Image (tube, coloured by chain):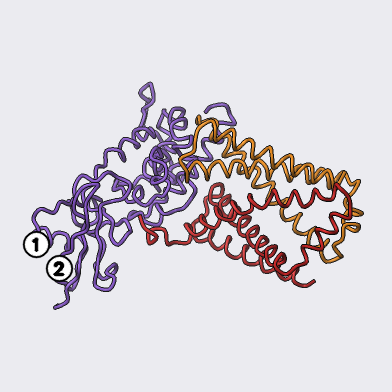
Chain colours: A red, B orange, C purple
Amino acid sequence: MTWRARNHPSYWAFALHRVSGLLLAAFLPFHFWALSTAITGAARLDAFLDWTRQPLVISAETGLVILLAAHLTGGLRLLALEFLAWPNWQKSAVGLSAGISLAVGLLFLLNAL
Amino acid sequence: MTARAEASLWIVQRATAVVLALAVLVHLATIVYAVRTGLSAVSVLARTQGNPWWLGFYLVFVLAAALHAGVGLRTIIREMTPWRGPSLDIAAVCASLFLLVAGWRAAIGLFA
Amino acid sequence: MSEAIEVAVWRGGAAGSLRSYSVPEQESQTVLDVVTYIQRHLDPSLSYRFACRVGMCGSCAMTVNGVARWTCRTHVRKVVRRGRIELRPLANLPVIKDLVTDMTAFFEKWTRAKGAFVPAATVPADFAMVPPESRERQAASAGIECIGCGVCYASCDVVAWNPDYLGPAALNRAWTLVNDERDAGNRERLAAVAGDAGCHACHSHRSCAERCPKSIDPTGSIAGLKRATAWALLRGEL
C-alpha cells in the first residue's frame, strides 16, 4: 500500500487527528507545570507570563490553538460518523468548516491584543 | 484485551471526548477573556482563587483529559510499535495518573 | 495506435522483483486486457486471476499503481502515468506467485467474525415478515452486496498494522447479520467482533469505503458494530 492509496480526505483527517492528539498530549504536562508555578506564588507566575510574551512563544501558542481546534473538530466529526451515521461528505464538511472557523476566530481574538 | 475491556475503553474515549469538547470551548472562551483583560499573576489569581465552581470545572476537565490522553496514547503505541500487553496497559494507566496529579495540582493551586 | 505502455509487473513470491513489459496501447483497454496480453503474447509464465472480466466476480483485484482495484473495471487511460503502469498483487495477503495472493486468511477472518447466518433453534411457524424500509433491513441491505474481492482488506492500514484485525469485509458481513432479525447468533457475534482485533481497532480511515467497487461503506458498518457492542456491554450482554 502506498501514499496514493492513502491520498483521500478521510485519511488526512485521521492523520491530522492522530498527530494533533500526540502533540497535545506531549504539551499537557508542560501546561500543568507552568500553571502550577502559581502555587509557589504570584511572582513566579508573573515571571512565567512575562516569558510567554516572546514572539516565538506566541507563535507556538497559535500553533497549539490550531492543533486544539483541529483535534476538537476532527473528534466531533468522528463522533458524528460513529453515532449519527451521516453520509461521508457531510462529515468532512462539518470538520473542515468548523475547524477553519474556530481557528480563524481564535487567531483573530488572540491577535487582537 | 478482552472484548468487554476494549468496548469499555471505547465508551470512555467517546464519553470523555464529549466532556472535553464542551470543556475546551469554555476553557478557550475564558482564556481569551482573561488575555484580553490583562494577564498578570495578580489579576489571574484574584479571579480564580477561592472559586469552588471553577475548581470543580477544572477537576472534571483534567480528569477527562487524563483519561482521554491515556486511552489515546495506548491505542497509538499499540498500533504503531511492537509494544503491547499488560505492561503497556500499566504504562498507559501511569500516564493518565501522571496527568491527573499534575493537572489537579495546578487546578488546586489556582482555584482552591 | 502506435503508443506502447510500459508495464512493470511483480514476478515472484514474497521475494521477487518488478519485470517490465511493453504492451501496445488500444482505444478502449482495461488493465486486465493488458495483463492478459502479457500472458498470452509476451510471457506465458505470468500467473494472475480473473473470471468474469465484466465486474461481477471480484477475482481480478490487484494493486494498480499503488491502489487496490478490479483490473477488468479499470481503464488504462485512467491510471497510466507517463506511459507507465505498475502491477502488484493485492496488499496485506501472502503472495503465492506473481499477481496471485492467498486469500485464506481473508476468509478465515470472515468465519472468526461469525459472518455466517445462525438459524433460530426452532423452525418458525411462518416466513419472517421483514419490512424492507425498516432501519435494520436497510442497514443490512447496504452491506450484503459484498462479493469478497478483498479490495477493502488490501486498502486498510489497520489490517497492515495489526495482523489479527478482522478487517472491513468480515466486520461488514457481521453487521449485516446483526441487522438480520431472523438471525439467532448475535450474542456470540458481538463478542467475536469486539476487541482490539475487531471493530474497536477501526479508526475510520475510510480507505475501505473509498476503494470498494460495490460502493459499500464498511466504516459505517463497523461504526454500527461499535454502537451495538457498547449497548450490549451496558446491558450486560457482552
Q: Tell me the residue that label 1 is attached to.
A: C42
Q: Which quadrant, please, contains the N terminus of chain C? A: bottom left
Q: Tell me the residue that label 2 is attached to.
A: C23
Q: Amino acid at mark 1?
A: Leu
Instruction: Give coordinates of residue C147: x percent, y percent.
Output: 29, 46
Query: What kind of element bears circle 1?
Result: helix
Residue at image x 47%, y 48%? C220
Residue at image x 50%, y 31%? B3
Nearer-N-terminus badge (2/1):
2
Q: Are marks 2 and 1 in contact (CB under 8 Å)?
A: yes
> Same chain for marks 2 and 1?
yes
Query: What kind of element bears circle 2?
Result: strand
Residue at image x 65%, y 57%? A68
The correct choice, above or below, for C29 with respect to B75 in the image is below
Q: Amino acid at mark 2?
A: Val
Chain for disc number 2: C
Rate crowding at label 1 as few (under 14), some (14 to 19) or many (20 or more) other CA atoms within 10 Å: some
Image quadrant where residue A106 sits: bottom right
